[in-house]
Amino acid sequence: MERKRNLRWLAWLAALAAAGALAAPAGAAPAPRLPSPMPDAFDEPAVPMPDPDLWQRIRKGFLMDPLDSPLVHEHEEWYSSRPDYIKRFVDRGSRYLHHIVEEVEKRGMPMEIALLPVVESAFNPHAYSRSKASGLWQFIPSTGKNYGLSQDHWKDNRRDIVAATDAALNYLQRLYDMFGDWELALAAYNCGEGCVGRAVAANQRKGLPADFLSLKLPPETTNYVPKLMAVKNIVLAPMLYGIDLESIPDQPYFTTVQAPQKIDVKIAARLAGMPEEEFIALNPAHNKPVAVAPTGTLVVPLDKADAFRENLGNWDQPLVTWNTIQGKKGESVHAIAKRYGLSGTSLKQVNNLQVNRNGRLSVSQPILVPGRGKAGVQVVSVTPSPAAAPARAPAKAAAPASPPAAAPARTTSFYVVKAGDTLYGIARQFGRAVPDLLQLNNLTARAVIQPGLRLRVH
């Protein structure tokens, strides 16, 4: 065990040295410099090229000391024995990580913080915990509101990638200012400043050390910082753990574009020429099939921004094909759904309705129902400049059809699957729930749909 620990320390030091994070000890004599050859008059000055891999930039930004705890080694074993799990969070995180790294760097914070969403949500913006925490950074409702992340019928900004990242870093900076130690700040992010403050005060009263490893904290928090340190160690030296850490380009993946205050998610995705699931992954805060953007912006991949702007400028049909009605407390969900050609399950899924056991609304609330507008989009082809296109799209995203065809009218009974389609996207397109679509077509939940397959939708 001791030999294994020593090997890990040596690997950690070697990785730091390779990343340029180790400096010479204070007072050490500089290494002797060999004389350089006389420069040729025609030689161009050597300009160091930036490393194209974002992981290397992350490694160079690590500032926290190693945590000497057996819990770190336990979590290293857990992560390294699950390479598929690591691949999944890398695929998801490749959309968001560059933005997070940029924001952490701007604030001069340790780059370990950029890896915190691995521990919190595995980079799943729709992650939701038993304590009602939501988003990449897992804000509970009250803390989210305290840091400007509003939550309402239309939108939950705890899932907004840009807003939640800003809020999380603001909160972490405040915690660091409070405790003067990043390990304690991270612990407080997990269990609250009151929890850590009481543990620190208890140790101080007994004359005991008040560092993270010395505190008596809840089990989840005791494991929280070691988990982050385990992820850091794997990022520092993935080969030591038998992990093939897929490269992420050190360049922005997404940007914001001006958009109408309200637009169908389906239409917005098609205007950008991208699958609906990928659009939702970049705009996960929206609770409904209609994206509500009070700030007038949406997020799209950098190489889709020009296409979105041009297609939006050429659009001459309604941008919203859903209407809002006011549901009254005690109304039957089934009766409302039937009036608009939906199943009760679909209506509940679209609106996240609060209903009692009799299937009636437990509170009065706005309800989205299909309107009469068509959701077809005529998309022009815009070729992005090579500099704007990310070198790698997340593996999870399907390739969009080019150009997307107009959506069939609601009276259509069948739909022919196209490249990039998913059951979820098709179900939303026709106002159905996925289970309804599966039942209509005698399919199981594990069904794989292929282009050309004819699906019954009504």
Image: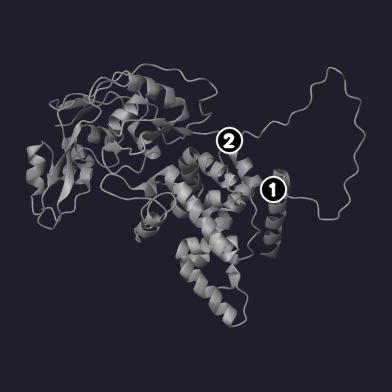
In the picture provided, is 458 more to the left or to the right than 291? left
Check if mark 2's residue and mark 1's residue have beta carbons within 8 Å.
no
Residue 254 lies, with reference to residue 209, above or below; the image says: above
> In the structure shown, which secondary structural element does the residue marked by tag 1 occupy?
helix
Q: Amino acid at mark 2?
A: Asp
- Residue 180 in which image quadrant: bottom right
Residue drawn at the location 45% of the way across and 41% of the way down? 92
Asked whether the viewer can see residue 226, the reply is: no
Residue at mark 2 to residue at mark 1: CA–CA distance: 19 Å
Q: Residues within 10 Å of mark 2 (few under 14, many from 20)?
A: many
Residue drawn at the location 71% of the way across and 48% of the way down? 21
> In the structure shown, which secondary structural element does the residue marked by tag 2 occupy?
loop
Front residue of 411/81: it is: 411
Residue 339 lies, with reference to residue 364, above or below; the image says: above
Please state the horizontal and vertical placement of residue 125, each as a whole percent of the image: 40, 46
For the C terminus, the quadrant is top left
Q: Amino acid at mark 1?
A: Ala
Residue drawn at the location 32% of the way across and 29% of the way down? 268
Count every numbered label the image shows and give the total: 2
In the picture provided, is 291 more to the left or to the right than 4? left
- Residue 339 in which image quadrant: top left
**Disc sitting over residue 15 in the figure:** 1
Quickly name the residue at label 2: 250
Q: Residues within 10 Å of mark 1 (few under 14, many from 20)?
A: many
